[in-house]
Amino acid sequence: MIRFYFFILFFFGVLHATSQQQFQLAVPLVRYSSLIFDHQTTVACSFDQAGTHIRYTLDGSEPGVNSNLYHKPVVISGKQVHFKAKVFGTSFYPSETIALTFINQGLPVRQVIGTMPSEKFKAGGLVSLHDGQGGQPDIGNGQWLGYEGDTSTWLLTLRKPAQPKQLLIHCLQQHGSWIFLPQKITVYALNNQTGQYTQAGELFTNPPSAESPGAAVPLIVALKDIGNTTQLKVICYPLTKIPDWHSGAGNKAWIFTDEIIVY
Amino acid sequence: MNRRKFIQQGSLALTGFAVGANSYARQKQELVLGHNNKRYKIDTQWGSRYGAGYAVNDCHEMVQDSKGRIILLTNETKNNILIYDKMGRVTETWGHDYPGAHGLTLFNENGAEVLFICDNNRHEVIKTTLKGNVLLTISYPAEAGIYTKADEFIPTETAIAPNGDIYVADGYGKDYIIRYNASGKYLGHFGGRGNGNEYLLNAHGVCIDNRTQPATLLVSSRQQQAFKRYTLDGRYLQTIPVPGAWVCRPVVKGDYLYAAVLQSQSNQWKQSGFVTILDKDNKVVSNLAGSIPHTATPVPEEMYQTIKVFQYPHDVCIDDEENLYVCQWNSGKAYPYKLTPVVS
């Protein structure tokens, strides 16, 4: 009987004391020079709040209490690195996860010529498609080229002959701004021997849905081996029109891209 | 049971209560926000505890009158003005004619307190008594030659000089500071957008800074993440950078400069606001729910939200006991919070 009263009042004691409001931590501050890098780059995190620490992963998994503990800028190398970081602290709920995709610059590109972007979103011109800059999903950062509803064709010349395995077009998905991923991307490679273009790869994207988040999306086209090449022809097809569930239904869909990378 | 057993069981049970409460209380200490000698505890229920029956929309600004009452301006036309006591009880409401209610300033005009309301939708500044009787309405200064029509003028804030001159910040229009005399006659303007230090980008707030001799004008150039200081004649004096902080309006109380920070530059449009406090040497000494200020360098390091206490704080009011009241824009119609100083 004694124990019964003990536990009842212990329980109410705990309940009373736990009526303090608990807050969530904010996301950490992250700094990096560009999401597109050559060889390697670093990402620095800070979070100046007593009693907290940052944990991160490099494999795209959600950071947890056993993930890498951040204590100095993290080196990023490889082809594509999915960096995720989160702040933990006693008496706080963990922060949301901050996620960045770092993309290797790939084979050096001498030039890109072809369809010019809209006057409103022309960045530095077609040279912006191979300047090793960009990657952030911020329309206003001056890196993105915008194309309104037109099929775009680009001729990409490599600095040296190569047998590329993949072509990556870094695109923006932001349905609120009528920006959709291309419906299809077709890549042709110029066979240096024959002087003929041969289709090397094609990618179809999934139809967009209302739930698709606003994000920078790397679209990767796998290329079959057609021998040495110095030039790729890339044709990028937008959606025929904005889908019916969207407030801009029936209108032209924009494509935004800030870099084309060849691996 | 007999008396002895009752006392025995009762005291053991109460020990259980005390142990439970004590052990958990030690693990979960009440949150203290801020740094150095400007630290606070927060009551997020202050405005809703007794006031939840009064509708609000964006809670834009707050002032305290000489009776100690906290006056809130919201763009909810059911009651644009809510007047609270310091416990958070609503004692009076008025106002149905301010759909774009944004700026609220209190001025003691020869012993009578008056309010200046900036309305974004009406493109006007309206002077009223504390009961809401309209005394003066100011619209865009056509004679200044900087506006072609009334709706280019979108005033966000006013500051009233000791002689009654009215400084209007056109924070959502052309970023000018327009000066009128106490009767509403246009006297001049300065600021606006451009590439020099004296120009502004989103001149969201303005206040008189009596800490300087003579008094000067402080303007928040919100998107530039800085305060800018001018003479009362509009001559540019200095920039006070607050990197990372989208400061809404400068509020001077005692030796300190306070501002609600709408959001962190590093995490935009994600409810990343906090409150910043600077001392009279223009050094950030405390960020409430924000990063530790580093005062060693002349320009502070970029500041950012660290605890998600606030979403989009829009104004901070400091009362006569140094308590703070914070009201918010676009934060789910949140009622104001109260913060009480922690003396270490």
Image (cartoon, coloured by chain):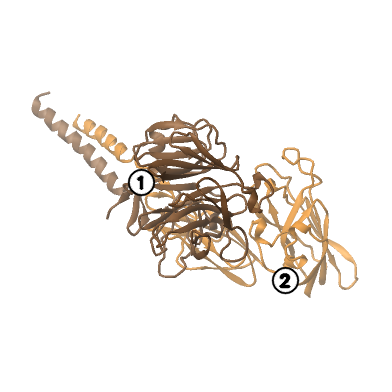
Chain of the residue under label 1: B
Tell me the colour chain A is drawn in: orange
Q: Nearer the viewer, residue B15 or B80?
A: B80
Splitting the image into 4 quarters, where does residue A170 fall? bottom right
For image coordinates 38% across by 57% down, the residue present is: B256
Q: Is residue A207 above or below residue B296?
A: above
Disc 1 marks which amino acid?
A: Asp
Q: Nearer the viewer, residue A13 or B53?
A: B53
Q: Which residue is mark 1?
A: B319
Q: Which mark is residue A46?
A: none
Chain of the residue under label 2: A
Splitting the image into 4 quarters, where does residue A77 fall? bottom right
For image coordinates 30% across by 48% down, the residue present is: B27
Q: Residue furthest top?
A: B1
Judged left or right of residue B97, residue B17 is left
Disc 2 marks which amino acid?
A: Leu
Q: Is residue A214 above or below residue A79?
A: above
Q: CA distance from mark 2 to mark 1?
A: 63 Å
Q: Which residue is mark 2?
A: A107
On the image, the x and y values in percent for residue B151 come to 65, 44
Judged left or right of residue A237, residue B85 is left
Tell me the colour chain B is drawn in: brown
- Evaluate whether label 2 is on the same chain as label 1: no
Q: Quadrant of the C terminus of chain A?
A: bottom right
